[in-house]
Amino acid sequence: MTIASVILAAGLGKRMHSSLPKALHPLLGKPIVFHALDAVLPQVDLPPVLVTGYGGERVREEVARAYGERVSFALQAEQLGTGHAVRSAEDQLRGKADILLVTFGDMPMLRSETLRRLIQIHHETGSTITMTSVIGDLPRGFGRVVRSADGKVRAIVEEAVATPEQLKIREYNISAYCFDAEWMWQSLAELKPSPKGEFYITDLVELAISQGKGVESMVLEDAAEGLGINNRVDLADCERAMRARVNRQWMLAGVSFLDPDTITVEMDVTIGQDTVLYPNTYLRGKTSIGENCAIGPDTTLLHTSVGDYSVIQYSVAEKATIGSHVSMGPFCHLRGGAILQDYVHLGNFGEVKDSTLGEHTKMGHFSYIGNATIGRDVNIGAGTITCNYDGKTKHPTEIGDETFIGSDTMLVAPLKIGKRAKTGAGAVVTHDVPDDTLVVGVPARPKERKDHCD
């Protein structure tokens, strides 16, 4: 049994009022269509065919960049309905699969497990069509499922052509189907246009019934899986539902959320057990957090890794690496290339960019470190700045182990400061400092150390 897939993403998305194709609007850190693809890919034997239309070139570029040859494409040049859209993939798929799974690119809440169950029911019942539906109060333009007195599916009626009585039906088609592939390809050619001149894939249900074919229905327990996106209100509803789903998964896996409604964890984030997330925390991209950490409140981490037992408060980190047992904040900012090794302390209003702070180093508040390599057990006093940019070029600073940098020191790069060296408060260091040397003043010069004996 070979399973193929068509994902429909050719809609104009007019109600989004955006120059960005609807399929590419972000939902919990990923384009909407990526969620649909991620649900389908584990269930099929052939690359899904993504049918695009408006903004198709841009959609194809983004999908190809992320998925490569795992996804194929077809173009629906004219917007003539869902049945016409599926036919756009006929040349690629006809004769190559036994079952065709059809889903929509703007239905991101469908789980891969749900699609697996749909395929299983389709296979076990030997049906020609197996469809999905939800029961509730979410019309959202969905077709109504019309059943006979014995509970059998008789038809799907699109909202645009439904009668007032049919609009009262509370069972909605959510547009995920399994078809007997060869029957479907033959039957698509028999579809009649609607009064709007469109060919609806939902009309295949009534056609199959008229031919005495089997039609099964799987009613979803979780109505949130039926949420689709037509406008930005729908997008916000899906974001809220997806966030709640992801947060729940992490809580069940051993992560504490002190206020789940205010915490956002994007899809590719990983979190270790016994970590606590405080309110207004936003974990984005491919961020990874170890065990027993405390993150937040009011903290954003983007593409950042954090070790175990670290505490980060009221801070922002982007493309940074944070070790274990690190304390950071409040109000710190780690920019791209920042590395805090184990047991580093970063005080309030500290900023680090493209620099490494060695183990057990402490950096006082109101300091900026850029393009620097700093050893272990270094003390960086409050107000220290690496003057790394001369208007044209960024220059490096190197600071050896066990060095003491006094408050308000200006380190004018390029610069090397040796091990166990010291700078006096307010020093402006413009030349390299040897090991075990104290420099003071503006510009800083070595000062002889006097040994006092009792």
Image: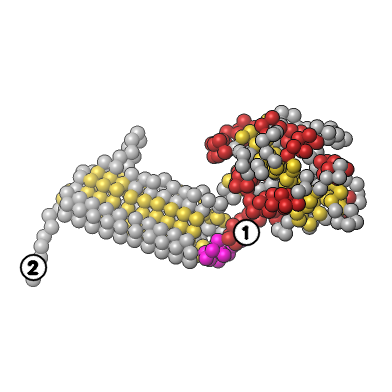
Residue matched to label 1? 244
Where is residue 177 drawn, in percent x and y? 73, 46
Instruction: Name the residue type under label 2.
Output: Cys
Residue situated in front as seen by the camera: 221 or 298: 221
Image mark for residue 147: none
Residue interval drawn in magenta: 250-261
- Dot placed on the residue nearer the N-terminal end, 1 or 2: 1
Instruction: Name the residue type under label 1.
Output: Ala
Q: Which residue is drawn at 47% across and 49% down?
A: 303
Q: Would residue 39 be counted in the magenta stretch? A: no
Q: What's the coloring here?
A: secondary structure
Quadrant assignment, res 424 = bottom left
Q: Nearer the viewer, mark 1 or mark 2?
A: 1
CB within 8 Å, label 1 to label 2: no
96 on left or right of 199: left
Q: Would residue 256 be counted in the magenta stretch? A: yes
126 on left or right of 296: right
- Residue 319 versus residue 188 in the image, above or below: below
Residue matched to label 2? 453
* Local SS, label 2: loop
Where is residue 280 drawn, in percent x and y? 55, 59
Q: What separation in Å lies between label 1 and label 2 (alpha carbons)?
A: 68 Å
